Amino acid sequence: MKKYLLLIAFSTVFLTFKSFGQVYEKIYSLSSSEVQNHMNQNKISGVDILTGVRAHHVIGLSGIGIAQKSALETLLNNDSRVISFVLSEDGTSVIIESQAVFTKEEFQTMLQSLNGTITGYAAEYSI
């Protein structure tokens, strides 16, 4: 039983680090040389690689009515990683300025709770 619990714990830790590594690699590959240099310096300094990196998300949406729009605004306002956002009047698009650790996948999970879907997505990273 003890070995089984250790195996589960090790697997969870391994998969968590692997998924964070994939996020870092994806952001790094999509970033300008200025952002890449900043991330490299963060790594050398021993701080989180994404410290000081911002993401600018432009997202197309569907399935967001009046009630969902208000709920989405509340979710975004309450997320400490979100710096600012602009949600279109008709709920078909949102522009989000956030810390880089706020990813498309996390927004998608947030959106699923409102029965909304992403119809288009683009992100740029800056410091």
Image (spheres, rainbow, N blue to C red):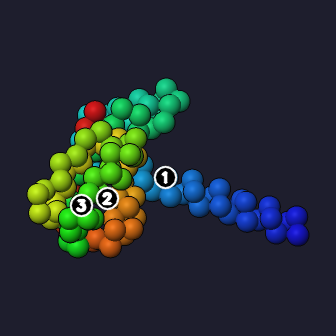
Residue marked by disc 2: 71
Q: Nearer the viewer, residue 63 or 10?
A: 63
**Please, what secondary structure does the residue beneath circle 1 have?**
helix
Q: Quadrant of residue 80?
A: top left
User: Disc 3 residue type?
Assistant: Lys
Discs 3, 2 touching: Cβ within 8 Å: yes
Q: Nearer the viewer, residue 11 or 120?
A: 120
Discs 1, 2 touching: Cβ within 8 Å: no
User: Residue 83: x and y, percent?
Assistant: 30, 39
User: Disc 1 residue type?
Assistant: Gly
Discs 1, 3 touching: Cβ within 8 Å: no
Label 1 to label 3, Cα distance in Å? 33 Å
Quadrant of image for the N terminus: bottom right
User: Disc 2 residue type?
Assistant: Ala
**Please, what secondary structure does the residue beneath circle 3 have?**
helix
Given the current orientation, which residue lies at the most extreme left position?
A: 89
**Please, what secondary structure does the residue beneath circle 2 have?**
helix
Q: Nearer the viewer, residue 48 or 83?
A: 83
Q: Quadrant of residue 122?
A: bottom left
Q: Residues within 10 Å of mark 3 (few under 14, many from 20)?
A: many
Residue marked by disc 1: 21
Q: Is residue 108 left or right of residue 126?
A: right
Identify the residue at image location x=39%, y=68%. Answer: 113
User: Residue 79: x and y, percent?
Assistant: 39, 46
Identify the residue at image location x=42%, y=54%. Answer: 23
Given the current orientation, which residue lies at the most extreme top position?
A: 45
Q: Is residue 45 left or right of residue 65?
A: right
Residue marked by disc 3: 69
Label 1 to label 2, Cα distance in Å? 31 Å
Nearest-to-viewer mark from 1 and 2? 2
